[in-house]
Image (cartoon, rainbow, N blue to C red):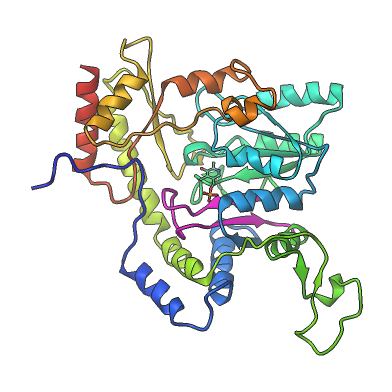
Amino acid sequence: MKDPFEKIPYGRQYIDEADERAVLETLRSDFLTQGPAVERFERALADFTDATYATAVSNATAALHLACLAADLGPGDVLWTSPNTFVASANCGRYCGATVDFVDVDPVTYNLRAESLREKLVEARRTGRLPKVVVVVHFSGQSCDMKEIGALALEYGFTLIEDASHAIGGSYQGSKVGSCAYSDMTVFSFHPVKIVTTCEGGAITTRSKELHSRLARLRSHGITRSPELMRRKPEGPAGWYYEQIDLGFNYRLSDLHAALGISQLGKIELFIERRHALADRYDRLLGELPLILPRRIEDRRSSLHLYVVQVDPDRTRRTRAEIYERMRAASIEVNVHYIPVHTQPYYRDLGFRDGQFPVAETYYSRALTLPLFYSMSDSDQDRVVSTLRSAFA
Ligand SMILES: *Cc1c(COP(=O)(O)O)cnc(C)c1O
């Protein structure tokens, strides 16, 4: 019999024998660091997302940093992002010495709201503080309104970066997330809780040859081996001479990680279909409870990284904290995504205050992330639902 107190996490990776074989084969090959598997992974990612280029890196935080550098973000510049995200979407601006600000979210999708962005841009043009970069976040795997936001990028001249850490495999009005149909670059995370994993890992997709070449160079110390980019005539025989022409980093992904990524990418449709089946089931089973359920918008396909409900204060006296504790006490590891970034002490020290982004703050006060992952069984899910029912009783 199944242990009724067995932990149910909010997310977890799924690794099969094919994944193990892929990693082992690479471990026994000539390349361990960035080599042919990374190249194959990049090709697979670009093909899968309908982008032209993909650059694999050590994690999505590094990917965001490089994307900002490739956009020439620096001291004196401004980056805007959503307050409802992981801190990395904002920190990338700070790594470059830029000023960071936020645009409040939509009350239905919890994504950065295009209309709020427009209003803030009008105001920023008046005061001469337009952003150089805007990072939109496809929260829970559901795309932002890219057509509207892409049009604003062209009108106001900012570089548009999609933080699609939650959203690989999603689509928007028929275009794949990562295709960069409306943006300059898209960032993915392959952390184990995300849709597909490389253990640690990330990538940036783009349609721009120029951005791709900068990203690839910055990933590896700012070094080039392309004679056309060199300042001096190559010295000595081919292969010996290189030039460092920018200040880059070691943000490379290893071939072991990439081999796992290629293998995982082969299962992505299965992963997302199961997530949809589980989300549909949650929708049906939770209908009677005093919860605001997540809305899936018709013209886009979410990859359903997260299933987030809100405890509805109009229909229950129970608080989110009470429900959270009851669930945790029953070994169901619910979570909360996200504490609004501007309320973090580091950002408070930069001058941000409670009340500045009220939609994100109200959403946060009620939000609860329920377990959702590929290998979750129907009976795991039934246990989550019945525990929730008794928590509200
Ligand atoms: C997970 C995540 C990141 C960071 O990903 P890492 O690969 O762990 O660096 C960035 N942004 C968002 C929205 C995330 O969910």
Residue 61 placement, left or right of 215: left
Range shown magenta = 185-208
Q: Where is residue 142 in the image (x, y as percent from the top left)?
A: 50, 39
Left or right: 211, with 338 as reference point:
right
Residue 183: percent from left, percent from top? 69, 46
Label total for image: 0
Please, is residue 152 above or below residue 21 in the view? Answer: above
Q: Does the magenta stretch include residue 146?
A: no
Picture quadrant of residue 83: top right
Q: Height in image: 61 above or below 53?
A: above
Check if residue 198 falls in the magenta segment: yes
Out of 2 and 312, give the one closest to the viewer.
2
Q: Position of residue 36 (x, y in %)?
A: 56, 76
Quarter of the figure with residue 332: top left
Looking at the image, can residue 275 be seen? yes
* Quadrant (top left/top right/bottom left/bottom right) for the C terminus: top left
Residue 107 screen position, x and y as percent: 52, 22
List the single residue furthest toward the bottom. Answer: 237
| Residue at x 54%, y 79% (from the top left corner) | 31
Residue situated in front as seen by the camera: 29 or 248 = 248
Question: What residue is rendered at 77% in x and 71% in y?
Answer: 224
Q: Is residue 280 above or below residue 128?
A: below
**Is residue 333 or residue 194 the one in the foreground?**
333
Relative horizontal placement of residue 61, taking residue 309 as reference (left or right): right
Q: Residue at x 52, y 75 (%)?
A: 32
